[in-house]
């Protein structure tokens, strides 16, 4: 990949890129409020499970297929991404971030403002920008995990150093999920993180919320 391509990836998944990721906790706020996640070890286990068996793996597979899809309509892929969201807030998360990503990327790089769920929007923009799939998947998952770590740093709260320790411990998981997703078919999609899905549903009933999901 060219240096420009690497810079593009770093920009897309930087906290400064205006997709609104900071506003979403993916149900983690509920887990913290209920006492399920209270320290670095519990946070690491929770994020690793979501990466391996939940939205991390699912989104990475969807991203890869959006990246490979020929130019034209990918409505069916977008519909599948929405159908896989287990709660209203999770659907809001993927559509809101996807819309913001597409609009910003089109304004900056001219990648097309397709209002797709987030992984599909990233995959489509990555292909149009000529970015390689493997680093795109790795950086997407890294950004996903880093955002969840940031949620816990702010809300548990964890120390900044402990948060970075948790993130570093997830690098191997991120690489493994990215490698698998790059070769997977849509039939390989399957999620088995009922605790995280129930947390996403339960978050909608919290009387006081900092995050939108």
Image (cartoon, rainbow, N blue to C red):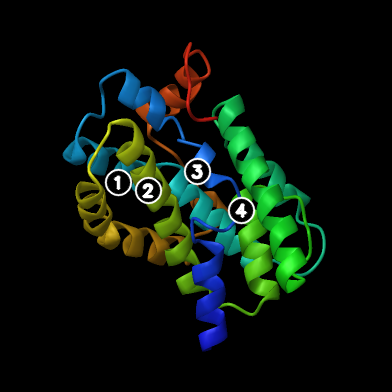
Is residue 154 depicted above or below 109 in this figure?
Answer: above
Mark 2 or 4, closer to the camera: 4
Residue pointed to by mark 3: 22
Q: In the rendering, at what x and y percent does residue 50 appear? A: 37, 42
Q: Nearer the viewer, residue 133 or 104?
A: 104
Query: 10 Å neighbourhood of mark 1: few (<14), some, or many (≥20)?
Result: many
**Mark 2 or mark 4: which comes first in sequence?**
4
Left or right, 57 with reference to 166? right
Marks 1/2 in contact by CB < 8 Å: the verdict is yes
The answer to whether one can see residue 74 in this image is yes
Query: 10 Å neighbourhood of mark 3: few (<14), some, or many (≥20)?
Result: some
The answer to whether one can see residue 1 in this image is no
Mark 1 or 3, closer to the camera: 3
Q: Name the element at disc 4.
A: loop
Cα distance, mark 2 to mark 4? 23 Å
Cα distance, mark 4 to mark 1? 25 Å
Cα distance, mark 1 to mark 2? 5 Å
Cα distance, mark 4 to mark 3? 9 Å
Q: In the rendering, at what x and y percent does residue 181 appear? A: 46, 60
Residue pointed to by mark 4: 18
Q: Name the element at disc 2.
A: helix
Residue appearing at x 76%, y 65% in the figure: 107
Q: In the rendering, at what x and y percent does residue 37 appear? A: 26, 29
Residue appearing at x 26%, y 24% in the figure: 36
Residue pointed to by mark 1: 48
Q: Name the element at disc 1.
A: helix
Residue pointed to by mark 2: 51
**Mark 3 or mark 2: which comes first in sequence?**
3
Q: In the rendering, at what x and y percent does residue 92 appear? A: 63, 34
Q: Nearer the viewer, residue 98 or 124?
A: 98
Marks 1/3 in contact by CB < 8 Å: the verdict is no
């Amino acid at each position: 990949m060219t240096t420009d391509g690497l810079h593009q990836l770093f920009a897309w998944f930087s906290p400064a890129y205006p997709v609104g990721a900071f506003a979403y906790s993916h149900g983690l706020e509920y887990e913290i409020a209920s006492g399920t996640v209270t320290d670095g070890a519990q946070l690491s286990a929770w994020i690793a499970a979501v990466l391996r068996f939940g939205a991390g793996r699912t989104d990475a597979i969807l991203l890869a297929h959006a990246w490979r899809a020929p130019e034209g309509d990918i409505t069916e892929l977008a519909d599948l991404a929405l159908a896989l969201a287990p709660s209203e807030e999770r659907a809001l998360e993927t559509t809101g971030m996807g819309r913001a990503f597409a609009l910003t990327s089109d304004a900056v790089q001219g990648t097309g403002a397709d209002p797709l769920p987030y992984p599909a929007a990233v995959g489509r923009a990555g292909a149009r920008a000529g970015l390689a799939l493997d680093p795109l998947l790795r950086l997407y998952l890294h950004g996903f995990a880093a955002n969840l770590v940031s949620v816990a740093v702010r809300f548990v709260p964890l120390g900044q150093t402990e948060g970075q320790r948790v993130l570093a411990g997830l690098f191997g998981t991120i690489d493994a999920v990215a490698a698998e997703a790059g070769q997977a078919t849509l039939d390989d999609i399957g999620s088995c993180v009922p605790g995280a899905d129930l947390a996403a549903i339960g978050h909608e009933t919290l009387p006081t919320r900092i995050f939108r999901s």
